[in-house]
Every structure is written in structure tokens, then in C-alpha cells.
Amino acid sequence: MIKKKIFRYIYSIMNLTDNSDINISIENGKIIITPKNNLLNDLVSKINNNNLHKEIEIKGIVGNEEW
């Protein structure tokens, strides 16, 4: 029971969810918990037909772009 409360507390102060991946390491006798960084390849691998949007065409310059 105490384990769940500790992890619930840690997840809340780190703004994590139940699906969040974390790294746990021990340095100088201390437990270090850090969120795993999502690399671009990890994010791109999650693209599928349900979350893929169609191409967007922008006509004309909308800022300071030069093509």
C-alpha cells in the first residue's frame, strides 16, 4: 500500500500519467527517477491512420518566409 502511495505522489509532482515511461537509477546511494525522453523516432513510430492528418496547403506568404 505504501509503495502505491509513494509512486502516486512521485507521478503527481512530476506531472506523469500511468502510461508515462520513466528511468530509475541509483547514484551515490540516491534513487533518481526521470521521465524518459521521447526521441523523434519514437514519436514518429506512433503515427498511424487514426492520428495522421491530411496535407495542409498554405497559399501565399503568411510571415517573413522566403521560398
Image (cartoon, grey):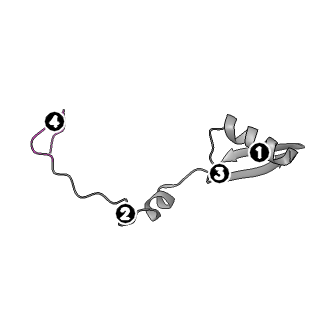
**Observer-nearest of 29 and 5:** 5
Corner quadrant of residue 62: top left
Q: Nearer the viewer, mark 3 or mark 4?
A: 3
**Observer-nearest of 17 and 63:** 17
Q: Which residues are magenta?
A: 58-67
**Mark closer to the chain start, 2 or 1:** 1
The crowding category of the residue bearing disc 2, from other C-alpha atoms within 10 Å (few below 14, some 14 to 19, many at least 20), is few
Distance from the alpha carbon under mark 1 to that under mark 3: 10 Å
Distance from the alpha carbon under mark 3 to that under mark 2: 22 Å
The crowding category of the residue bearing disc 1, from other C-alpha atoms within 10 Å (few below 14, some 14 to 19, many at least 20), is few
Which image quarter is the C terminus in?
top left
Q: Nearer the viewer, mark 4 or mark 1?
A: 1
Residue type at mark 1? Phe
Read off the residue under disc 3.
Answer: 18
Query: For the point 74% across and 45% down, which residue is it?
Result: 33
Secondary structure at numbered mark 4? loop
Residue 41 in magenta stretch: no
Corner quadrant of residue 19: bottom right
Read off the residue under disc 2.
Answer: 50
Residue type at mark 4? Val
Residue 61 in magenta stretch: yes
**Mark closer to the chain start, 3 or 2:** 3
Read off the residue under disc 4.
Answer: 62
The crowding category of the residue bearing disc 4, from other C-alpha atoms within 10 Å (few below 14, some 14 to 19, many at least 20), is few
- Percent position of residue 30, x then y: 86, 41
Read off the residue under disc 1.
Answer: 7
Corner quadrant of residue 59: top left
Vertically, is 66 above or below 46?
above
